[in-house]
Image (cartoon, grey):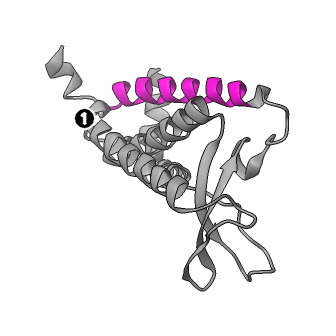
Amino acid sequence: MLKKLKQTGWVWLWITVILLIIDQATKIWADSALAPVYGGRIIEVMPHFDLNLAYNYGAAFSFLGDAGGWQRWLFTIIAIGISVALLVWMYKTPKSHKLPNIGMALILSGAIGNLYDRMAYGYVIDFIDWYVSKDGYHWPTFNIADSVILIGVGLLIIDSFKNPEKSKKDETSS
């Protein structure tokens, strides 16, 4: 059984663990070193980039953030479902398929990181703030988990263009 696991995409789960630790450590730091948005401490890193604490009760771009609380459980269920699906997909993907496995490991890390926040606190801790001007457009505040999800999805998209025959073969063998 162990020999079989070593041949699957699960050998890439070490990336998930490392990024999950980094994500949670940075969120703990942000929650203690920064005060909440709107009057709290802001660290200006460079022009157009600050560290600014925000609590996201919704999903991406605070989608459903003011829905009254039920969304916490909806997004929890979705994150658990995605995490299970990624683990199954990684198990079925040979370890030699590096790009999709790394992409899935990144997405899994971000999903678990934000899932933990949602379950432990009822919101996701965000603190990375990019903007055009202080009084102008701000990209929605995000965190490390959000970043690795985006990178992971990008890797899966790149792989689908690089290896379209592999993607079709994987779909027909399922």
Image spot of residue 39 (x, y percent): 73, 67
Q: Is 9 on the left or on the right of 68, as rendered?
A: left
Callout 1: 10 Å neighbours few (<14), some, many (20+)?
Answer: some
Based on the displayed image, in which of its 4 quarters is residue 120 positioned? top right
Residue in the foreground of this view, choosing between 94 and 146: 146
Q: Is 72 on the left or on the right of 79, as rendered?
A: right
Quadrant including the N terminus: top left
- Residue type at mark 1 is Val
Vertical arrangement, residue 18 with respect to residue 47, above or below: above
Camera sees residue 154: no
Please tell me which residue is depicted at 39% across the width and 41% down the height of the picture.
105
Based on the displayed image, in which of its 4 quarters is residue 38 positioned? bottom right
Please tell me which residue is depicted at 74% across the width and 52% down the height of the picture.
61
Q: What residue range appears in magenta?
A: 72-94
Based on the displayed image, in which of its 4 quarters is residue 42 positioned? bottom right
Vertical arrangement, residue 158 with respect to residue 8, above or below: below
Image spot of residue 78 (x, y percent): 64, 27
Camera sees residue 172: yes
- Residue of label 1: 11
Q: Hey, which residue is sitting farthest top in the picture?
A: 1
Residue in the foreground of this view, choosing between 171 and 153: 153
Q: Is residue 74 magenta?
A: yes
Q: Hey, which residue is sitting farthest left in the picture?
A: 3
Q: Is residue 108 magenta?
A: no
